[in-house]
Image (cartoon, helix red, strand yellow):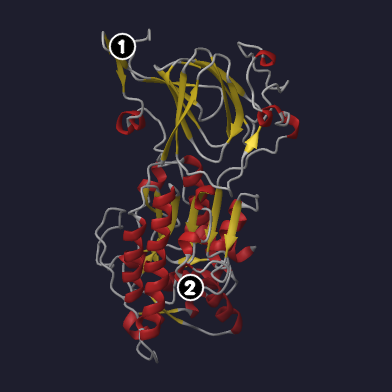
Amino acid sequence: MEDFGKALARFETNIPGLVVYDLPVHGDSRGWFKENWQREKMTALGLPDFGPVQNNISFNDAVGTTRGIHAEPWDKWVSVATGRIFGAWVDLREGPSFGATFTVELDPSKAIFVPRGVGNSYQTLEENTAYTYLVNDHWSPDAEYAFLNLADETAAIAWPIPLSDVEISPKDLAHPRLADVAPVPPRKILVLGAGGQLGRALRAELGDAGHIEYATRAEFDLTAGDAESARRWRDYGVIINAGAYTAVDAAETPAGRKDAWAANATAVAALARIATSNGLTLVHVSSDYVFDGSSSTAYTEDDALAPLGVYGQTKAAGDAAAATTPRHYIIRTSWVIGDGKNFVGTMASLAERGIDPKVVDDQRGRLTFTSEIARAIAHLLRSGPAFGTYNVTGEGEPTTWAAIAGQVFELTGHDPSRVTGVSTEEYFAAAAGPVAPRPRNSVLDLTKIRATGFEPADASASLRKYLTV
């Protein structure tokens, strides 16, 4: 062992995510010592917190032992305990770097992080070489692998010892050439609540690529109790929870209360357990109803929760559950309008039918279109800012439901003065069933989401576009 005293350092390669690390090795007359895996130091240096669950050792007694090229559906932390190897890695993932090759020698003072889908291979350069690797999934017969022939002409790996002179398994000799390798797709994204307004907006935003799955409640019922065994979750990278119980007033009834807690809290807790156990990112959509609306200023992501009614209480409980997941984005939004029955559509219909409505004018907020929420979710997943809660609404001056109704009338060619503003109490005075309390102030501060590079669309402009398409 020659390289004593190096500092811990990282070195990027030409393959995205494949990173070489120098490891400090401390030696004396007795031998040497190193921290082969030290989570706190290495994640601080940029190593993904990939959550290893297994440590494997491959002992090779002869020089020239050659293994690979295997691309497994998990991440690997590769190092050498004793001896020395020539390592070769080929990107077998979908994308512009497919087929890119990187080689380097590893001794005990070096390690390399190998992301899922990058083909891994090595050749021993010394006798009694112990090749070690941490992985973040257990072997499974259902896992899908990709392989590449060690002698592939496109990768053109310059093996130090000719392949004709070394020990190779028959399986490795039989692997396909690069032209015949099916690229490894990205980890899957599962969108739950795909049949709802936000689910449909997410499909429009994210598309129908093979690694994106959409599931309605009928296809994947989180309240059924078997969610944690319903998928091979290690094949997934993201769960987007676009489903929720949103019948605000019905949630105040005995039956509605049970359904709201089941969908908005218990189901989210199940998703949080799945995400935490499998290292997934959980995207959960929250609501302004987690606040009581008493603030005189816009609510920030850090303001204390104080829900008024059952719906708000269940959403707050869901937020608390989602926040236990290390990798989470909680999207807090308000006054949502999407494809389907909604306030804007109702007002447009009333205007067209000659009905002059009374509309609440003592609640303030901003409209948020589902397309905007979907765009924000895609942005967060693509740009990867710090995990946590982000407010997402339309931009512009806060307004009231009555003022929005007037805008709808005007934009559809009708007289906005036909809309009469009333208090919340007056509006619900004649309600036949229970009425949930509403926050009077639903304005959410957008500073944090803007800091990620996302520019919220103007709510009035979005309303105009919505009514004219």
Q: Nearer the viewer, residue 401 or 384?
A: 384
Q: Residue 67 sits in which quadrant?
A: top right
* Residue 134 x/y as whole percent: 43, 34
Q: Nearer the viewer, mark 1 or mark 2?
A: 1
> Which quadrant is the N terminus positioned in?
top left
Give me the residue at 72% from left, 30% from top.
174
Q: Could one spot residue 396 in this view of the protein?
A: no
Q: Which residue is mark 1?
A: 5
**Along the line of sight, the residue nearer the viewer: 4 or 289:** 4
Q: Which mark is residue 285?
A: none
Instruction: Give the residue displayed 40% in from the left and 41% down from the top.
Output: 51
Mark 2 neighbour class, 10 Å CA radius: few under 14, some 14 to 19, many 20 or more:
many
Residue at point 35% right, 82% down? Answer: 252
Q: Earlier in the sequence, mark 1 or mark 2?
A: 1
Crowdedness near tag 1: few (<14), some (14–19) or many (≥20) residues, C-alpha within 10 Å? few
Pick the front one: 31 or 156: 31
- Where disc 2 sits, the SS reads helix
Question: In the figure, 246 relative to 460: above or below?
Answer: below
Looking at the rendered structure, the secondary structure element under dot 1 is loop
Query: Could you say which quadrant of the image residue 452 lies in?
Result: top left
Residue 461 appears in the rendering: yes
Amino acid type at circle 1 is Gly
Q: CA distance from mark 1 to mark 2?
A: 70 Å
> Residue 211, how many percent across, how many down?
61, 49
**Quadrant location, the C terminus:** bottom right
Query: Which of 177 and 246 lies nearest the eye of the viewer?
Result: 177
| Residue beneath disc 2 | 405
Give me the residue at 40% from left, 31% from top: 47
